Image: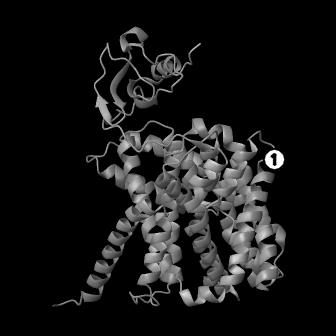
Amino acid sequence: MLLNTEPNTLAILVGGTLLLLSLFASKLGGRLGLPGLLLFLIIGMLAGSEGPGGIGFDDYALTQFVGTVALAFILFNGGLETSWRTTRPVLWAGISLATLGVLITTSIVGTAAHYLLGVPWVLALLLGAVVAPTDASAVFSVLKEHALGLKGQIRPLLEFESGINDPTAVALVIGLTELAKHPNLPLLPLLGSFVQELGLGGLLGFGLGHLGVRLLNRVNLPLDGLYYVLTAALVAVIYGLTALVHGSGFLAVYVAAVVLGNSDFIHKRTLRLFHEGLSYLFEVVMFLLLGLLVFPDELLKVALPALLVSLVLVVIARPVAVFVGLAATRMPVAHKAMVAWVGLRGAVPIILATFPVLAKVEGAQTIFNVAFFLVLVSILVQGTSLPLVARLLNVKAPPVSPHTMPLEYTPTGAGKNDLAELTLPPDSAVVGQRIVDLHLPPEALIVLLRRGDEYLIPRGNTRLQAGDVLQLLGGKPFLDEVRKRTLRQEA
């Protein structure tokens, strides 16, 4: 052997084994009603130096780097799945929760940490900022695992908030970390930096997202698989370029993905599936790494005060932040209460907790351990109880169907045609009618119909039933006309 590859080979084998275990654990967790994220963390902890696996890992810099990359791709996938039609009504509510809500949570949790942990105010507020943001990967993952349908605007608001509140928390954490290291630092420049990061992130994300659409439709790559590489490169360029000019790379990536997801571009459906799988891979890797990084005996040392801070976060800080942040909206109280309960914390707080550790802030290790404990409590308590709380608050809607339509369509890039799906509600005026009697525009075709677990080829004499999912092909104006006719309620 000219090269000793045994350590690398062993690392690859261990990594692959942990990924497989995580996939099986996720399947088991679904049957037991436990979030897969919790099981990923537990597997990482068991594989760590204090578990049976005995893997020694304490590389905070690597964890932060992997976490940053992972979060960027998770936010990109979340943005691709964000429908502007459903997000637009909750735009200002989401922005309020992502800014004012984060500040309120930081203040309340910081106050509790100061008195319960006995740490200085700056360090206490730093902990508050670390755990303030809800986690996009946790929210997206847990809602999908439970296939939980929620009434009204709850789900769009939760997904939008979790996608855009990270930049606020990142800016706060970086600013408070600097303040902890340099107590005499003036606050005005920190505030200006905060506004600059969010402003540049939003503007660059919007502009680069539109450029991304044009690039995808005009580049004409020789192999379809290269479009996957292109979109992955777009994520890296958007994040890196925005961060380089001191904007929020995370916000830019999310906004650009929303622009892409609501535009027509070549291979859109397959690219969304690719990023969904890539997002899940990063999610698993991230939680495994975080599990490896923590030492259970250090968690036990802060267990009691950390549990009390967790209760303050879940029972006081998050509800106050939600009800104050949504005070100007007409959302029902039960809906606001559900939004408050789904304030899941995931990997983001743990990644943010590595910032003060790497900056060598005194007491940063305590912040990291408490943040990890809070994440465990959030996923275990809130993540497992979502269906029950939704039922108690009477906000549960029919479950989201896990089915996907098997037909795919590759647009030419001209944007003249689209492949869309439409579910017939029970009160639709066309339920019970034959397709031929609907007199739909000839430029819009019903190419496939799903009824329950069956896929049917629609014919003129096919009678439509409530719950049928129609797959439509046609130009946007004609598809809108079909939606208008089929979704019209009975008189």
Above or below, 182 relative to 287: below
Residue at position x 77%, y 64% from top? Answer: 316
Q: Secondary structure at mark 1?
A: loop
The quarter of the picture where residue 488 lies is top right
Tag 1 residue: 327
Look at the image and tell me in which quarter the N terminus lies. Answer: bottom left
Which of these two is toward me, 6 or 392? 392
Q: Residues within 10 Å of mark 1 (few under 14, many from 20)?
A: few
For this orientation, the residue located farthest to the left is 1
* Residue 138 in which image quadrant: bottom right
> In the figure, is residue 96 to the left or right of 477?
right
**Residue 61 visible in rendering:** yes
- Asked whether, in this view, residue 120 is left or right of residue 78, the answer is right
In the image, taking residue 208 as reference, residue 374 lies left or right, namely right
Residue 247 visible? The answer is no
Q: Is residue 169 above or below residue 302?
A: above
Q: Amino acid at mark 1?
A: Ala
Residue 14: x percent and y percent?
Answer: 32, 80
* Image spot of residue 271 (x, y percent): 38, 47
Taking the image as shown, residue 435 lies to the left or right of residue 194, namely left
Question: 345 and 270: which one is in front?
Answer: 345
**Total tally of numbered discs in the picture:** 1
> Which residue is at a point 45% across and 25% down the rendered structure image?
466
Residue appearing at x 58%, y 59% in the figure: 385
Q: Is residue 298 above or below residue 291?
A: below
Give coordinates of residue 395: x percent, y percent.
63, 44
Q: Which image quadrant: the C terminus? A: top right
Identify the image's colour scheme: rainbow, by chain, secondary structure or one colour.
one colour
- Could you say where residue 54 lies in the image, as x and y percent from the top left? 40, 90
